[in-house]
């Protein structure tokens, strides 16, 4: 037995001695340094000014991975946290790929099906450091959880005390849906007169949903607790400084109908009965909003990035949280000269639930403050979603429309437009939205003996719609727009593809489609490839269609996690139109493609090719040479830009690496390209947290 134990020790020692960091892909000229000293890897990088961050990573088995997490203060390193391990809990469920539309499914109730949670286990067998632009990735293997396997990646970003921790894992198993929780954990330790925590933290902090900073003493015996927060951030701190933990602001959140705040952070011990030690982190609610809960796709062999960000500060929690908030402009869409922000597709149902229900109408409803505090200038509603009387009788339909129009006029002014809109889902196929440039009275039914339009003594002109042909006539008569909501998923599965040859679709009054992050997939470097692919398909079909961002949310309350589920369109408008005079300029900017879409962290104030902007037509020379001019403002360091073009049959992608960027930048780029034989072109930009922005097409002709 003694000889057997001695052999085990020798084998263990031999295995451990082989864990050397592979530096073959690390650039030694980088201002970031990676040094191995025995079992420890010391990773240092420049943060702000002359200050540096430092991670001391221990590759010895059964030792905490992060021996020291440090930030310099006036040139001297101080411990922000010590002896901490990353912790990941992977919940694996089943995806329905048969009943609807494969991986684009939304109407799935994964939360109601059998699932199982696993603690992700790290075995320190190999390590490597790689330079990728201004960032350095330390990769440590191996990770294992159920059928998922992979490695841990720690990424530091020059120019910021920011780093990312990711379990990058894949499975061979098909039809898999996942969620993950993650964070940093440490042991309970004896510290002089009492019990403490290995991190050295004494305080936990977060902002509550009323935007007020909360603090509590760290109790290492505290049983785990889910905590609702604002800004998706929870912090541990000591007198030496603060460490903030937060997710990617949009990518982490799988699509739901509601933006409820579902307690997206946690702290305490024995998290989900799988992580025994005390820690803090991010979490997902398995039940979601208890409507349709699709979780996250994990197709076979895709590298799913289960990740979270950490931000270091030598200040106290308020200062650290302020630094985190800068990455999302305080969860507010910033002003861009020459543009106004517009967000679309909201089923608030304020008309039916409050006004028509006879409830007291506040002078300033809370949902308006949510929009305004989010930096949204123009809101396009989608009222009467199965709550009213779209087909009549006239006595109800017309008074409901009047209530909607009066409500929008009441709360619109020079700084904010609340605009009527509906999701009619009649006549055309699938789900779609309507948008008129002024109040329009229309009823979604017409008997054979009734005219298309009548003059009502109370309401004026009233349209009655019998079919898709009438609907097109109405759009033409009132200069309105329609487009496919949540294209190729939900109630629009198969659309607009099924009606792409219809007259109404080919009309200039059919705008195109709307973009939202459905489905979620943590292996993708962009959000909602589903609609971006459709955007390219529509252009190759030969139609000048466009794609706007949509939220498709049912309630907008101050306590909601709105920003994670929101996105906006930056329309080229110098000022908001007067509601009473109509808002035709809003529809004109949309119809002409004079806008870009953003999740909020990346702005594209300038986009031209050979002097032509989005929505315009460019005549190319015979050689096809062109120059893309793109001004980009960003918060998280950028990942890549992509010039996407098509020739009527195929789609071409030219990726431009932007990993040499630092956080919080602003630059005008010029990218030479060749567009010979192409018919259209557009641009996307994505960052390290998979936040993004994309332009509309420029149309090309020889």
Image: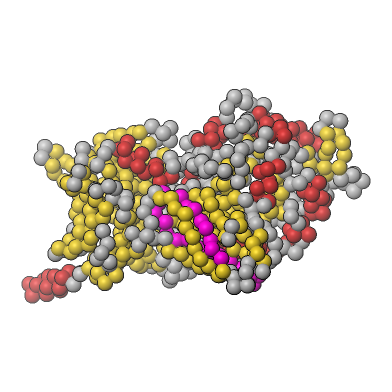
- Check residue 273 for magenta coloring: no
Picture layout, residue 492 above or below residue 280: below
| Side of 354 relative to 504 (left or right) | left
| Side of 23 relative to 209 (left or right) | left
Where is the N terminus found, in terms of image quarters?
bottom left
Q: Position of residue 64 (x, y in %)?
A: 21, 56
Picture layout, residue 210 above or below residue 635: above
Q: Nearer the viewer, residue 192 or 23?
A: 23
- The image quarter containing residue 301 is bottom left
Say if residue 227 shows up in the picture: yes
**What residue is at 68 percent from the left and 34 percent from the top?**
579
Picture layout, residue 443 above or below residue 667: above
Main secondary structure type of the part rendered in magenta: strand
Magenta segment boundaries in residue numbering: 626-649
**What residue is at 43 percent from the left and 64 percent from the top?**
657
Q: Nearer the viewer, residue 257 or 154?
A: 154
- The image quarter containing residue 618 is bottom right
Q: Count the numbered circles shown.
A: 0
Q: Among all residues in the image, which is located at the extreme left?
A: 2
Q: Position of residue 604 (x, y in %)?
A: 51, 51
């Amino acid at each position: 037995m003694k000889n057997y134990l001695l052999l085990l020790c020798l084998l263990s020692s031999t295995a451990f001695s082989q864990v050397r960091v592979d530096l073959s892909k690390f650039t030694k000229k980088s201002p970031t340094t990676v040094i191995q000293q025995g079992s420890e890897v010391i990773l240092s990088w420049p943060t702000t000014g002359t200050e540096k961050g430092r991670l001391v990573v221990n590759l010895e088995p059964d030792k905490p991975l992060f021996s020291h997490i440090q930030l310099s203060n006036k040139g001297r390193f101080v411990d922000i946290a010590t002896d901490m391990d990353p912790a990941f809990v992977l919940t694996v469920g089943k995806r329905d790929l048969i009943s609807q539309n494969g991986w684009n499914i939304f109407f799935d109730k994964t939360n109601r099906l059998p699932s199982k949670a696993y603690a992700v286990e790290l075995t320190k067998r190999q390590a490597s450091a790689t330079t990728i632009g201004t960032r350095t990735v330390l990769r440590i293997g191996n990770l294992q959880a159920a059928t998922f396997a992979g490695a841990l990646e720690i990424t530091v970003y020059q120019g910021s005390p920011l780093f990312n921790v990711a379990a990058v894992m894949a499975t061979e198993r098909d039809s898999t849906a996942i969620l993950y929780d993650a964070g940093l954990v440490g042991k309970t330790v004896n510290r002089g007169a009492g019990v403490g925590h290995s991190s050295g933290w004494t305080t936990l902090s977060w902002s509550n949903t009323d935007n007020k900073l909360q603090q509590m003493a760290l109790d290492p015996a505290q049983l785990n607790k889910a905590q609702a927060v604002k800004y998706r951030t929870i912090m541990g701190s000591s007198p030496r400084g603060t460490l903030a933990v937060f997710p990617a602001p949009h990518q982490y959140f799988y699509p739901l109908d509601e933006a409820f705040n579902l307690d997206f952070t946690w702290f305490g011990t024995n998290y989900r009965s799988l992580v025994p030690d005390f820690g803090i982190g991010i979490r997902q609610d398995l039940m979601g909003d208890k409507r349709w809960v699709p979780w996250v796709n994990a197709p076979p062999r895709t590298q799913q990035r289960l990740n979270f960000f950490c931000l270091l500060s030598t200040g106290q929690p308020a200062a650290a949280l302020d630094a985190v908030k800068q990455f999302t402009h305080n969860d507010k869409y910033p002003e861009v000269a020459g543009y106004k922000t517009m967000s679309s597709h909201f089923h608030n149902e304020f008309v039916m639930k409050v006004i028509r229900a006879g409830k007291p109408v506040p002078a300033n409803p809370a949902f308006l403050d949510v929009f305004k505090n989010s930096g949204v200038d123009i809101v396009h509603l989608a009222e009467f979603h199965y709550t009213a009387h779209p087909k009549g009788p006239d006595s109800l339909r017309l008074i409901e429309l009047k209530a909607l129009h009066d409500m929008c006029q009441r709360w619109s002014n020079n700084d904010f437009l609340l605009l009527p809109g509906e999701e009619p889902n009649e006549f055309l196929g699938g789900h779609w939205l309507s948008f008129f440039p002024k109040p329009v009275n229309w009823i979604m039914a017409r008997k054979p003996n009734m005219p298309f339009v009548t003059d009502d003594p109370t309401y004026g002109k009233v349209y009655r719609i019998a079919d898709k042909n009438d609907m097109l006539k109405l759009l033409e008569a009132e200069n309105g727009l329609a487009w496919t909501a949540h294209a190729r998923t939900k109630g629009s599965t198969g659309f607009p593809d099924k009606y792409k040859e219809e007259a109404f679709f080919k009309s200039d009054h059919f705008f195109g489609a709307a973009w939202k992050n459905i489905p979620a997939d943590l292996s993708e470097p962009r959000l909602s490839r589903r609609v971006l692919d459709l955007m390219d398909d529509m252009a190759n079909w030969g139609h000048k269609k466009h794609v706007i961002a949509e939220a498709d949310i049912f309630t907008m309350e101050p306590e909601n996690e709105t920003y994670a589920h929101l996105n906006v369109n930056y329309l080229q408008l110098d000022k908001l139109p007067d509601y009473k005079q109509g808002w035709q300029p809003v529809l004109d900017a949309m119809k002409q493609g004079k806008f870009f879409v953003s999740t909020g962290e990346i702005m594209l104030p300038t986009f031209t090719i050979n002097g032509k902007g989005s929505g315009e037509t460019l005549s190319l020379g015979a050689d096809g040479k062109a120059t893309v001019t793109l001004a980009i403002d960003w918060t998280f360091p950028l990942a890549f830009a992509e010039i996407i073009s098509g020739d009527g049959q195929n789609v071409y992608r030219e990726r431009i690496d932007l990993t040499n960027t630092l956080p919080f930048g602003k630059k005008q780029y010029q990218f030479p390209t060749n567009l010979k034989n192409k018919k259209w072109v557009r641009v996307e930009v994505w960052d390290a947290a998979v936040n993004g922005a994309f332009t509309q097409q420029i149309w090309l002709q020889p």
